Amino acid sequence: MIKVFIADDHAIVRKGLVQILNDTADMKLVGEGENGTDVLDSIGKLDYDVLVLDITMPGRNGLDILKQLKEIKPKLPVLILSMHPEDQYAKRVLKAGASGYLTKESASEELINAIRIINNGRKYITANIAESMADDLEKNRIGPLHEKLSDREFEVLQFIARGKTVSEIGNILSLSVKTISTNRSRILKKMNLKNNAELICYAVKHDLVKIDIE
């Protein structure tokens, strides 16, 4: 029996994923969470084999939580779930230690297969991801500008694109305003952008941020 914990801030999404697991004989849901705090708390309280983690949640995002999880429990298989196309996040989360990346659009068809694969110690990647990662090995490959960013810079970019101020981002990430401002400056320089307006336009154009309308 594969024991699974699901973390997603949308109750409707969790309900759908839970139903899929309930209809699968060799899997069992042992817990649910709606933010990063729930996930980190679960590590010490629950015993599970696979974590299904949404990359976009309130406060600290899934990528940040993933890194901390890997320090606490490095062998835990983590399947990243996202509404964003795989070409935007997949390589980044795999490099950070995730065992697989699945879009919410394909979750109903691929969730069970993905969980079984990573539970067996393998990586769940699509043909498109494999091809893109192979392309990265080529010399002089020029990818999207946001791929130049560090994970922290990429996270700050997402918060700025969601309209957060430097102070708000600092509070969320428990970092100083100076540190966030430095990250912002590096982002603009690496991406050849002039200001937040251009950064926001870029993020929206490349589907790098989820804008809540609830």
Image (cartoon, grey):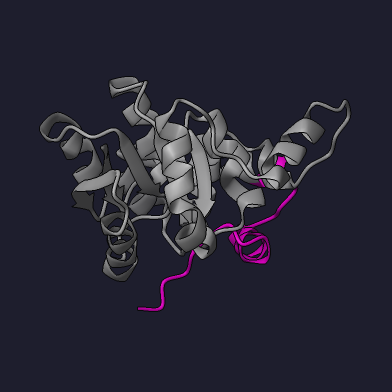
Q: Report x, y in % for residue 142.
A: 84, 39
Asked if 98 appears above or below 90 in the picture, the reply is above
- Where on the picture, by quarter, is residue 65? top left
Viewer-closest of 179 and 149 = 149
Viewer-closest of 183 and 71 = 71
**108 horizontally vs 153: left or right:** left
Q: Report x, y in % for residue 108.
A: 46, 62
Q: Which residues are magenta?
A: 188-214
Q: Residue at x 30, y 54 (%)?
A: 21
* Camera sees residue 63: no
How many badges with numbers are in the image?
0
Q: Is residue 205 magenta?
A: yes
Q: Residue at x 27, y 66 (%)?
A: 15
Q: Residue at x 30, y 71 (%)?
A: 12
Viewer-closest of 144 and 6 = 6
- Where on the picture, by quarter, is residue 46? top left
Q: Report x, y in % for residue 42.
A: 17, 38
Asked if 101 appears above or below 72 in the picture, the reply is below
Q: Is residue 79 magenta?
A: no
Q: Residue at x 51, y 50 (%)?
A: 102
* Name of the residue lying farthest toward the front: 25
* Camera sees residue 208: yes
* Name of the residue lying farthest toward the left: 45
